[in-house]
Structure formats: C-alpha cells, structure tokens
Image (tube, rainbow, N blue to C red):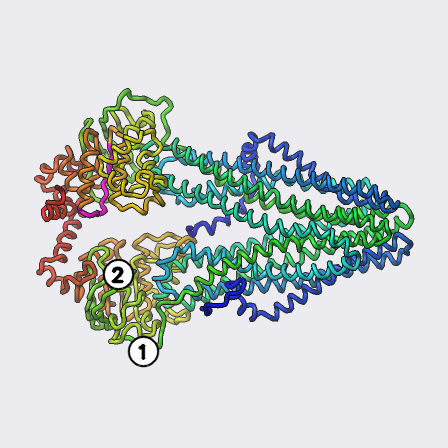
Amino acid sequence: MTPAGRRGPLPHLRGLLPYLRRHRRSLVRGIAFLLATTALSVLAPWVLRHAIDDLTVQVTRQKLLLYAGVIVGVVLVEGLTRYYMRMVLIGLSREIEYELRNDLFAHLTRLSPRYYQGQRIGDLMSRASNDLSAVRMVLGPGIMYTANTGATFVATIAIMLMISPLLLGLALVPLVFVSVIVRYLGRRIHDRFEAVQEQLSNLTALVQENLSGARVVRAYAQEPHELARFEESNREFLRRNRRLIRMFGTLYPGIQLLMGTGAVMVLWLGGRMVVAGTITLGEFVAFGTYLTMLHWPMIALGWVVNIYERGEASMGRIRQMLDAVPEIRDQEPLPVTELRGEVEFRDLTFAYDGTPVLRDVSLRVPAGQTVAIVGPTGSGKSTLVSLVARLFEAPPGTVLLDGHDVRRLPLAVVRGAIGFVPQESFLFSDTVADNVAFGLPADAPDRPARVQEASKVAQLTGDVAAFPRGFETFVGERGITLSGGQKQRTALARALSTDPRILVLDDALSAVDTYTEEEILRGLRAVMKSRTTFLVSHRVSTVKDADLIVMLREGRVVEQGTHAELLARGGFYADLHRRQLLEEEMERTA
Amino acid sequence: MSGASFHEDDTIAKSYDRQLLVRLLRYLRPYRAAVGVSFLLIVLMAGLDLAGPYLTKVAIDEHIARGDAAGLRRVALLYLLALVGAFAVRFAQVFILQMTGQRIMMDLRREIYSHLQRLHVAHFDRNPVGRLITRVTTDVDAINELFTSGVVTVFGDVFTLIGIMGVMLALDWKLALVTFSVIPLFFLVTNWFRRGSRQSFREVRKWIARINAFLQENLSGMTVVQLFRREERNRAAFAAINREHADANLRSIFYYAVFYPAIDVLAAGAVALILLSGGSAVLRGGLTLGVLVAFIQYSERFWRPISDLSEKFNILQAAMASSERVFTLLDTPVKVAAPAAPRRLAAVRGAVGFEGVWFTYAEGEPDWVLRDISFAVEPGRRVALVGHTGAGKTSIISLLARFYDVQKGRVTLDGVDVRELDPAQLRSSLALVLQDVHLFSGTIESNIRLGSDIPDERVRAAARAVHAHRFIEALPGGYAAEVKERGTSLSVGQKQLLSFARALAHDPRVLILDEATSSVDTETEALIQDALRVLLRGRTAIVIAHRLSTVQDVDEILVLHKGTIRERGTHQALLAQRGLYWRLYQLQYKDQERALGAAPAATA
C-alpha cells in the first residue's frame, strides 16, 4: 500500500507509473513519432498556400507538378510516422493492460476463501473487464490524444499566428466552446446515460421478479396488473431515453455549428483581410485548413478529460482489489517438506464474523486413522475439516499437523498432503482426464496411470467409458453435462489422484446412490488404510466403519466413539441411525 | 451475471433473412409519419451541409476577387444561416428518429413480455430466466440499432455522397470526373479496413470471451484451485489467454494504424489531382480559383459517408440474429390456453375433483409423475397430501391451479373441467400459498393486495387475522414499508404470515397450501399455527402438510408414493394401519410431538 498523506491529482492513476516506467523506451519512441507526425501534418497546407498564391499571379505547370508532388510526398511520410505512432502508443497500452490483468489475476489467486465470501463474482469480473478497459483507455487514447492535442495546438497556432494574430483570436473563440460543450455535455450525457442504464436494470429486475414468481402471478391472476407495472416501467425507460436523446442530439449538431461558425469568421473577416491586402488568398485558404485541423483536438480535449475521470475512478476500484492483503500465506514457515498425516485439534474455538462456529474442539487423529464427523446442518462439520487444509485461519496453536501448528507449515506442503473433496464438487470446463489430474504436476510421467487408478476407486471408469470421447470428453458448457453423482465421483478421483497423506471427504457422496456409495467405500477402504481420512456425512451407512465417529452439535463435540459404542449409548447418533433405517425401508417400498 | 452471457455472441454469423426483415419492418408501420419526416430531414440536411464549400467559392470568385467587402458579409450571413439551419434539422432528425426507435422497442418489449405472461410456468423452469431477460433487453436493443443507425441513415449517407458529386459536376464536370477517380480507392481502402478490422475484432471478442469464462470459472472455484495448488499453473494458463487477447488487439491496431494514414494519403492525392488538373485550367482561364478551393474542400468530405456505409452491414447482421431469437420466443405456442368458449360458474362452491388423472412433465415419454389419481373434496373440507419428495404432491396442486394440463383424466372445480373454465374465474377462486414466499418489490400493503382491488380495511383485517399486523406496524412506515429485493429484510416467519395475509385478503373458495418446512422460533410457530386455523376456516383446502397439527386436523389424508395414492384416511385410522403413513409419521412428525410435549406452553 502507498503511504497515506500526499495526494496529488489522479492519485489512483499514479499506480500506473511503475508500468509506464517499465515501457519508457516505447513511450519516448511513440511520442517522438507523434511529434514528427504533427510537424509533417502542418506542412501540406503550407504548400497549398504557396500553390494558390502562385496561381493568383502566374505559375508554370512544372511548378504545379512540384507542389502536387510535395503534398503527396509529405503526406506519405506523415502516414508512415502516423502508423508508427499508433502502433507504438496504442500497442503500449495493450501491453500494460496485459501486465495489469496478469497481476490482478495473480493477486486474486492469493486471496483466501474468506475474501471471496465477501465479494460477488460478478463485481470482481466487472472490475477485471470494465474497469481495466477504462484504465486502458487512459494509457492508450488518453496519452496519445493528450500529446497529440498539445502538439497540434502548438504547431497550428504558431503558423496561424504568423498569418494573422487577429484572425486567430477571433476564429478560436467558437472552437474553445467546442471543448467546453464536449466536456459539459459529455458529463451530462454520461449522467443521463447512467439514468437510462439504471432504469434498464429496474426493468430487468421487474422481468426477473415476474418470471421467477410466475406461479404466484398465475395463481392470483395478476397478469393484467403485472403488464401494467411493466408498461409503467417501460414508459419511464422511454422518458429517460428521451432526456438522453435530447442532450445527445444537441452534442454533435452543436459541435458542427460551432466549428462552422469558426469557418464563417474566417470567410468573413479573412475575406476582408484579403480584400484589404493584409493577407494573401493562399494564406486565407491555408488558415481555413489549419482551423479545420484544430477541430479534432478540440473535441478530443473534452473527451480526454472524461477518459481520465473515468479511468481514475476505475483505477481506484482496481487498486482496492490489489490492496487486499492475502489473509493466508506463508510467514517464515518451518522447513518441513513432508507430512505423515497426524492431525490434532487443540481447544479449537473458531468464530466466523463474530459467530462462534466451533467451540472447544479437542481431537487427536493418529496418522492413518479414519475419522467420521456427523451432525446436523450448521453444526460446524465443514468448517472443522476446512481448517485442516488451512482454508480459514484458526487461532495459533489450535490446529496441528504432525505436531506443528498448521500456520507455521509451508502452505504448499499442507495442501500437497491433503486430498480434499469439497461439498460442492466444482469441476472445470476441461476434459475428464484433466479434471481428475487437476492436482498432478503437468509433466507427471505416471499421469495416465494415476488417472486410471483414481477413477477406478471412485467408480468413475464405467461412466467414462460411456462418454463420447472417454477421458478426453469435455465437461461443462463446451461438453457434456455430468449428473450430480458423476461430478462428485470425478471430484473424488481428483483428490485421490494426488496420492494424499490426508483425505478429506466433505459430505462428498451425497448425490451418489446408496449402491454406488457402497462400491466406492469398498474401493476406498484399501486406500484409506494407509492415510488419515476425514469423512463428513449425513449417512450412517457411510460412516459406520470409521475408527472414530465424532458427533458435532452447535460446534461442540457431543459424542464420540465407534459405531457400536455410540449405538449402545442411545444418544443422538443412535437416533440418527434409527431414522435412517426407516427411511431406507421406505425407499425400498415399491 | 451468469457465464452463459459471455458466449452468446457466437451466433451473430447467422445469415441475413428476408422474411425476418419483412416481419421487422412491420413494426415501423405505426410510425410511418415520423419515419417519413425523418427521411425528408435527412435530405434537407445533406443539402445544407453542401453549402459551406460552395459559399466559399462564391466568396472568393465574386467578392474577394473583386474587392467587394460588403458582399462578403452577405455570404458570411448566408453561411451562418445554413449552419443554424443544419443544426436545427440535424437535431430534429436525430430526435425524431431515435424516439421512433425507442417507441418501437417499447412495443416489441411489451409484446414479448405479454407473451411471457401467457406461457406456462414450466417454460421458466426449463429456460434460464437470465436468457429470457436478454430477449427483452439486449436483443431488442440490437433491433433498435437497425432502425436508428441502419436503415434510415444509409439513405443519409447516399444522399450526401450524391449531393457532393452533383455539386462538383455542376461546378466543373471535367475537374469533377478527374476528382472522382479517387472515390473507388476510398471504397477499396475502406472495405479492406472493414473486413480486416471486423475479422480482428471478432478475434478479440473471442479472446475476451475466453478471458471472462476463465475468470468466472477460476474465481468461482478458487478454493479448489488453492486446495490443489494450481495457482502457479492457472496463472500461466491465464497469462497465455491474456497474451492471445493482447496479440489479437495488437493485430487490430494494425488495421487502424494503416487505415487513417491511407485515407489521408488518398485525400492528399485528391488535392494534388485538383491542383494539377484544376491549376492548369486556372492558368488557362478555364476555371476560377474559387471553384478550385471549393473542390478541395468537397474532396475532404468524401470518406465519411463511404466509411459509414460499409459499417451498416454489421448492424444488419447483429439485428437479424437478435430478431431471430426474439421471434422464436414470440412464436412459442401457448400451451395452457384459455378455452374458446369459457364456462362461467354463477357462484363457486369449492368442490374439487381429480378423476383418473395421469400426468407427466416430459410429453411423449411415459414417465408418469401421477398415475391414475382420483379423489374428491367436498366444499369446506380439507385434504392433506403427504409423501416423500417426488411422490407427486406438488404436481397435484400445480394441476389444480392449472399451471399444466393433464394428459389423461380430468381435474374439476364444482364438477366442471378446469380446462373449460374461464381462467380468470378459476384462479380468483383459488389462492396458492407456497413454501418459498415470493415477494414483489413494492410495499407491504401492495404485497398483500397485489394488483387486485382490495380496500385498505380488508388488507388490514386480513393481516390482523393472521397475526401479521403487529410486526407490520413495527416496521418503519408500517403498511407502506418498502419491501426490498425479495423481502430480505423480513424473517422467514414474517414472510409466511405475509403470504397468509395475502391469501386471506383475496378470500378464495379453495386454498392450496404448501406448508413451509423451514424451522422458525417457537413463538412464531405458534402464531403460524393459529393463523393457519383462521386461514383454513370455511374453505376447501388442499394442503401439502409438514405440521403435525395440520395432519391431525384434516378430514382426509392422501398418502402418495411414486405418483399413486397408497393410503387414505384420517390420521388416527392411518396410524392404526401401521403402513407407509405410520413410517412417515415416525420420520416427519414424531419430533414435533416430542417438542410439543416438552414445551406445551408454546402453543397456548
């Protein structure tokens, strides 16, 4: 973060300076081309001036040919410099955009789940696209047109001063207003445009509300009322659009009018000067051309100010993201490279935004054991296992792996040792094989073998064989849609493929039918034998063979023991067991 | 925003279709006059824009050359007049045309929306709401572009071009023909640019879509990325896509970097030609200097209409793709249609009957959700539907509200098939209270009343009767309190009570109730139970029951299992059977009994 204190103009956009510094050679080159372009562009009208002046007296065909040749020649060279100017300056903005976007994503990969819970993905997306593009506008067109406007001003005004300072003074007046109205109307148009967009989102919300409440609308026969509501919103949209169009309809014609007025000034006053002999006819025509050359910079001036304004606001939002400090990261980690898989919770109390989720949990799991965690929704099961993978930050000394505080272990070692199957099996739109091998190094030589092996245990192989391209079938939008159970089994295979010391199944088989679950568990048994396993589940059938079953309620361990022990106790677990037997019985009733 | 919207642009390549265009043009018909005026204004505008260079010619030849300073003022004044006129005409033209476009959009949106009101509810389960919204917003917008920037302005460009050429020919046809020789080059360069930049733009869009898809996926699945230590590799993968995007952009800069200088060179070429050919003519005395200057100024105005013209094709294509999607939606047949000659009951008594009803959501497949369901409910009687998820409870109440039509058998109200009844009468005889209470943005009051014509007193009386009055009064603004974003500020229990008030205020003969399963605190639970009694009093009721008190109170319980009625009878009788209901009872209601036993004071 930048030290607080001095805040000059555009404080956020200053964050771009390091990037610009890195590209300073291109920047200097681009500006040089820009200056050359401007210098050349004022030459052609000057040649025209001499040609016309010569025509008023007497001139040879050769000289005319020379003039025409010079004009075309100058413009050709100017075209070349203009080409390079654009390539270099706009190219520069694209390069910095590239770097900035990479930096942004890299930073996002370092932020913890807690950060993401406080954000809407849509917002983050909009920053990475819309805001970034507003900042890019500053770097590209912003810089280019600022420099171009400055240079063109200096060059054309210098020449026009040579022709007639008086004429310049008068002709410039309406042009100054071009900048003023572009700036002024530009801002109001922006405001009104925002108002239109706001109404569009109101309209969208209304449609969304109506469609998602379609049953209520139908049931209460509210269609006419809903149509009336829509009509009203639709009319408001029209009203706001009318306001926008009125403003917007003034801008372009207004610019034309002001520019034309400048031309009228030149025609009238300049014409009188020619009659009076103060300036030549050639100068008169050239002056008009130079004045036309000022048109675009005048528009650009107002426009560029708006670009900077929007860019500044956008950069502010991007900086907000970049300034978020990663909550979970390595801080002087212990030199541990491998873990055996012993897990201990020691007097663990964990609160989430002030609400305690886990209270006084103490539990020691020797390496290689299988622990099942059961309990009602919201009892803290998922939170408990996610602390093992350090997805959230537990208080120091409360979560230990192999006797070390998880906070002192290298993050990569911790996560490398854990195969986690989350509750929601999130897959990537990639091939099945790529999804299963997600945690393997890209160049792992035994990749195909591991994918096969893990898929077999997860009972995925049969399904994959039926896919159109087997393991190379794409998953998701670009490919096939997997069922809930298939997704969960893929996620399971993904966790198994890394051959982890600690396996965490966070209610990971809920969408798998009982028969398949049985099969999976049978396959897993061999796998689980050699590793520490956490099984979070609602189903007794899943957990009954665990070495230890832990019952959580409202964040506390209320019962623990083996299946037999807990049944004998006749507490919560026994009750859960009884209900599930009944439910299974119902299922079987045909 | 969903990920889907980032991919939809791919379909733009759809080819141009004449039928679509004809159908689109029909929307212009009500605004014939406005469109006509707009045309006239465009022609006028093109004419006024031509005045400048011509007046310069007049000024040079007739006044400056003759030393006539007074006449110069007249010309300047004329010029100013032309400018002001062009300003007024241009403003009027933009305003009229844009407003017409907006009106057409409004018509189209209204048409789509009212069609959506008639489509049956399953349509919204099948189609993501987001996509339907796109039809009403984005697609309509693309069609608007066709009217405002496409069809009409093409004529403006053509007129301007023809106008310039006409004036030049009139001034000096030989010099004009010489100058025109650059026009084909303008076209060539512009077309090269359009094609190239469109191609590269498409490329850029493709990579933007990839970037967005990648970001969307990685941000949503960041936990998985971090769990499997994929940060480094995904950063690299992102950088690769990002690089492609940057490169595609760099390629597109090339077209711009070439195009603008090329236009400059062509313009300079035209000036050089005029200077050469016209200059010689001036020397011979065959041409005045004023005409030469006017030619130079006109030649600078060639390329804008030319470049605009070639842009129009893109707009046309985008509009065609959008209109195809819109028309497909508009052409979706309305499945649950009102009967041609609806029957109206003089007074609804509230007898409900299901006679041998078979039903499936997937038409054409014998995947029956309901099989041969028959039952009758006398007016004022109550029936509870119980059963596992997927047993068919929701389907039964949906059929009664006629969200769908049955495949076999019939559903009746007072002995009349619901398909023959006036839908408005059918639905005003029913009130539906669903688990998930849907609130509309508006006030508390408007959520009870909805769009119906219910007086204030009845709204308040209904709220009072279901114990909603107290919490409503406590809200800032009371009955006028704003309900935001689906009522997030209200508790689950409060929303329940509000939906009861809504149903009671509408005073239906038949109440369809899907009891909420979500747990509320004991005090609210007591309020809800009491409110339910009030709500059910004197009405026919079909209840998907989750409460013990409800199943104990009803006249008949239908136990559904896999689409059939497996058991029926009263609570006590069914318990005595020790069948399916008994097991369900153990699972779903036993706890409530225990809870009631533990805290009997709560219900008092």
Relative image position of residue B345 (x, y in whole percent):
29, 21
- Residue assigned mark 1: A336
Residue B287 in view here: no
Residue at 50%, 56% (x, y): give it.
B208
Q: Are there few (<14), some (14-19), or many (20+) residues within 10 Å of tag 1?
A: few
Q: Residue at 55% x, 47% y: name it.
A: A188
* Amino acid found under the numbered disc labelled 1: Val
Q: Is residue B473 magenta?
A: no
Looking at the picture, how far across and down is residue A435, in whole percent?
37, 61
The answer to whether residue A269 is visible is: yes
Quadrant in which the C terminus of chain A is drawn:
top left
What's the chain of the residue with tag 1? A
Q: Earlier in the sequence, mark 2 or mark 1?
A: 1
Q: Are marks 2 and 1 in contact (CB under 8 Å)?
A: no
Q: Is residue A519 above or below residue B370?
A: below
Q: Which residue is mark 2?
A: A382
Amino acid bearing label 2:
Ser
Location of residue B225 by image quarter: bottom left
Return the chain for callout 2.
Answer: A
Q: Provide residue A117's location: percent of width, then percent of height.
A: 35, 58
User: Which numbered tag is attached to residue B76?
Assistant: none
Residue at disc 1, secondary structure: loop
Say few, some or many: other residues with alpha carbon within 10 Å of mark 2 (under 14 / 14 to 19 / 20 or more).
some
Q: Which residues are magenta?
A: B511-522
Quadrant for the N terminus of chain A, please. Answer: bottom left
Instruction: Please name whichever residue, A469 or B405, is drawn nearer the observer in this view of the structure.
Output: B405
Q: Which of A266 and B293 lies nearest the eye of the viewer?
A: A266
Side (left or right) of A562 relative to B199: left
Q: How many marks?
A: 2
